[in-house]
Amino acid sequence: MTFENTEAFARELDARDPLAPYRKEFLFPQHNGEDVIYFTGNSLGLQPKRAAARVEQIMKDWKELAVEGHFRAENPWWEYHEQLAPYLEKIVGARAGEVTVMNTLTVNLHLLMVSFYRPSGKRYKILCEEKAFPSDQYMLQSQLRFHGYDPEDALIEVPKRPDEHHWRTEDILGVIGEHADSIALVLMGGVNYYNGQVLDMAAITRAGHAAGALVGWDLAHAAGNVRLELHDWDVDFAAWCSYKYMNSGPGNLSGAFIHERHIADQTLQRFEGWWGTKKETRFQMRPQFDPLPTADAWQLSNPPVLALAPYLASLELFDQVGMDALIEKRERLTAYLEFILGEVDKQVESRFEIITPADRGCQLSVFLHGEGRPLFDYLMEHGVVPDWREPNVIRLAPAPFYCSYLDMYRFGRILREGIESGRA
Ligand SMILES: *Cc1c(COP(=O)(O)O)cnc(C)c1O
């Protein structure tokens, strides 16, 4: 499709967009009485209007039923989390029973490493991408130290080539091959938070297995954004947060995937708690742990239902729309944003460099040559909400659920005015 940088063209794309009606399912911050142009769905997704009713239902059940709410609430609390897994299994490409919702992301990755990082002898190293998300770096370093290793030696970080902004799959596979006799675990971000790159998760998982390692994925920026086939890719485990593309609310719960072949493995180590035991016998308060035959065996505590409620509301919307439609719109919307950036670039002389490679999801990371923080501030003052990363990168993630083509057009106009005003 040939794009045009006009308001009429953007409105025409919106008129033909089957997802356009979903915009009004979300609550936008206001700027001068209008919805902001929201580019940070990769950081905190907008609030679905229907989330509040789900939360209020629990407040009401708590008020009226108190402890009885565990079993007699409209959606009984003791099994509330089970409603979320089937929706998530579709989103991440899992089989029934391979997904659970619990804790938060960094906590889940630590817990999953209890099961899947089992260093021994010469095989003890962990491989990740260089400059991984800070929480992941701290997590991997502390896990290594906990097991008595020195991260300087035991953490292998795959570099990008000098002067390149993305990783090449062949380089990642090469480093895995080089360390084939010493890697215990490959654990990487499926979609990189900084440059927006989608890694070839299928190929890397295969290579990790060929090297004799287990392979896990941090899907914080991938879940609800790109196509995932975790079961078919033979991924060992994965976890994601829900408050980015999945619009579940600040700091909300994480989802976790465990491949069914591991769920069945009785020799696997795991930290356990009472919510991981079979429901029929849970309240008999027996001393022996009797695991559920699903990823729920990794559950520890009775779940925070007030947090699960908005996540459930959001997942109902995902189920109505489906990942196929979201991905289709995401591709066109992001391409339109890329086109608009290119047009503005021509009007103001070349200043932007998109550092996101062709393998991408929603996000475009734009390196601002000759511009900087003042331009970012100008955008914020004019109703645009992008995200700033040092040294000079703005990240723009137009979430297909609620962003419009008109948003992209209007953003381009504001961007050009910002640069031309000389303020920036
Ligand atoms: C957002 C993000 C996190 C956040 O972790 P929390 O435990 O939810 O605070 C972790 N890793 C990556 C790659 C992220 O993008």
Image (cartoon, rainbow, N blue to C red):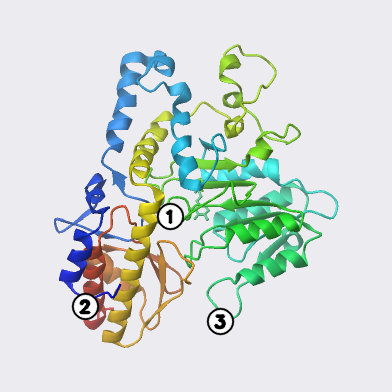
Label 1 sits on residue: 225
In the structure shown, which secondary structural element does the residue marked by tag 3 occupy?
loop
Picture residue at 27% right of the left edge, 65% below the top:
380
Residue 323 screen position, x and y as percent: 40, 50
For marks 1 and 2, the one nearer the N-term is 1
Q: Closer to us: mark 3 or mark 1?
A: 1
From the top left corner, tell me how far across and down residue 112 is, in percent. 63, 42
Q: What type is the residue that disc 1 sits on?
A: Asn
Identify whether 391 is placed above or below 398. below
Could you tell which of marks 2 and 3 lies nearer the N-terminus?
3
The residues tagged by marks 1 and 2 sit, at their Cα atoms, a distance apart of 31 Å
272, above or below 132, in the image: above
- The kind of residue tagged 3 is Asp
Q: Which mark is residue 376?
A: none
Callout 3–callout 1 Cβ contact below 8 Å:
no
Residue farthest toward the front in the current orientation of the protein = 1
CA–CA distance between discs 2 and 3?
31 Å
Quadrant of the rendered image containing residue 267: top right
Residue 241 visible? The answer is no
Task: Tell me which label, 3 or 1, sits earlier in the chain.
Answer: 3
Give the residue drawn at x 28%, y 78%.
424
Residue at horizontal 40 percent and vertical 13 percent from the top: 68
Residue ranking furthest to the bottom = 349
Q: Is residue 316 left or right of residue 170?
A: left
Residue, disc 3: 163
Residue 362: horizontal and vertical position, in percent?
40, 61
Seen in the picture, residue 5 relative to 10 is either above or below; the reply is: below
CA distance separating discs 3 and 1: 27 Å
Residue 94 visible? The answer is yes
Which residue is at a point 43% across and 44% down the rendered structure image?
Answer: 251
Tell me, for residue 417, which label it has, or none. 2
